Amino acid sequence: MQAAHTPSYYAATAHPQPERPALVGDVSADVCIIGAGFSGISAALTLAEAGFRPVVLEAKRIGWGASGRNGGQIVNGYSRDLGVIRARYGEDAARALGAMSLEGGDIIRDRIAQYDIDCDYVPGGFLAAFSARQMRELDHMKKIWEGYGHHELEMVDSAMLPEVVSSELYVGGQIDHRGGHIHPLNLVLGEARAAEAQGATIHEDSPVTGIDDQGASVLVKTVAGSVRAGTVLVCGNAYLGDAVPNLTNKIMPVSTQVLTTEPLDPSLLDRLLPRNYCVEDCNYVLDYYRRTADDRLLFGGGIVYGGTDPASIEGKIRPHLERTFPELKGVAVDFAWSGNFALTMTRVPHVGRLSKNVLFSHGDSGHGVTTTHLLGRLLGEAVQGRMERFDAFARLPYHPFPGGRALRVPLTVLGAWWYGLRDKLGV
């Protein structure tokens, strides 16, 4: 019996899928990919388009993890902005990453068009500011982005704000005309179908139990079979489990919570979100929301370091929704769910090699919808011997969480408390 998706709005509205049986027995492949989320499927499609026939192993179902549970927002860039990347790693690194910083969103749009993927794509995103300080930071960020070729950001003052979002919380914000929103589970399912049509094979319900790197080839073992491959790509992210322990220990799972209201009067949503942009705010622990294709408000936020769920998802998120839109006080909630993303200490994706034949990418740190698509492509390029762009990420130094696995949660919580206090004080 196949593992079920978490009972989310996305799972309830996903397009029907063919059965993808578990791997049974021993097979060979040129490339084996662990994980059928955005990273793994993006890599599989990149390789299949180039004539490879990759085998993808998924422990549960396609998009079962963060790729099928997130807020569905196309947010450009990385979890640390290009100014921080330049100050931390130097101008060459900033130029290399800056040149790729819009590519993830472009990949999504191109694949939607090329493969006719029905995933409710709507263009436009908005960063909402609570204070004059945040407005200054957005304006500064806009100038930095423009230095790296992104000229489609637009500042919004308080007078223009009601044309974008009708909430008394904000003083203004910034439109990203190259942002947007999608039904993420239907996106990854559509990309998986495209990869299969190009020659990829995907096995669901096939958890990896270990990797035996034998030099000339790598044996990837599952509960009922194995794949012998020339190259292995590890794309499990926050849901890798114990398949590759020395990778799992390098990131921290963080859960975020999402709820979806009952269907609302379209005219109400037209007033609350006149341009139908997705919205996220500028706080360190942020809220994010958007309108769905069937006129619900999907609202997310909150984080729990370590990847556990709060006692009540609705209890954690509803106060934020009602503070943002008081007219929705008491609105019925039809779906509430949680999902984990992988956080790195640097908040920059961690990319590299475990050996000559085993490559990995994880730790998108909350910007996974776009960066996973980019990094999946870079993994595919690396398999083909085109290493320059992959190495731009792989060269970045990795820093472990202080205190190791035992203390990473309390120390990170302490840091988040400090930044949250700054947001509340507006300093």
Image (cartoon, grey):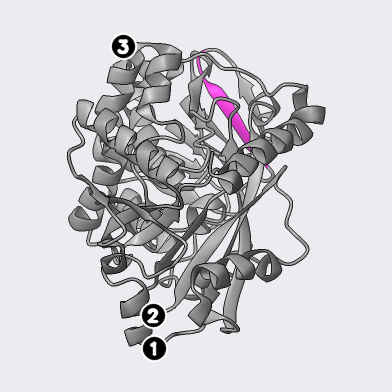
Q: Is residue 369 above or below residue 401?
A: below
Q: Is residue 211 magenta?
A: no
The reply to whether callout 1 and callout 2 are in contact (CB within 8 Å) is: yes
Cα distance between the residues tagged 1 and 2: 7 Å
Asked which secondary structure carries label 2, the reply is loop
Q: Amino acid at mark 1?
A: Asp
Mark 3 sits on what residue? Answer: 92
- Frontmost of labels 3 and 1 is 1
Residue 7 is at least partly visible in this image:
no
As shown in the figure, which amino acid type bears the numbered disc 3? Asp
Instruction: Specify start and end residues of the magenta stretch as a single range.
Output: 216-222
Q: Position of residue 69 (x, y in %)?
A: 53, 58
Q: To which residue does mark 2 refer?
A: 295
Badge 3 crowding class, 10 Å Cα cut-off, few under 14, some 14 to 19, many 20 or more, is few
User: As shown in the figure, which amino acid type bears the numbered disc 2?
Assistant: Asp
Q: CA distance from mark 2 to mark 3?
A: 45 Å
Residue under numbered circle 1? 265
Q: Quadrant of residue 120?
A: bottom left
Marks 3 and 1, the one that precedes in the sequence:
3
Measure how far apart labels 3 and 1 are at the Cα level.
50 Å
Q: Residue at x 33, y 78 (%)?
A: 271
Residue positioned 63% across, 27% down in the render: 247
Q: Nearer the viewer, residue 427 or 196?
A: 427
Secondary element at tag 3: helix
Residue at the image point whose x is 62% and y is 43% from the top: 420
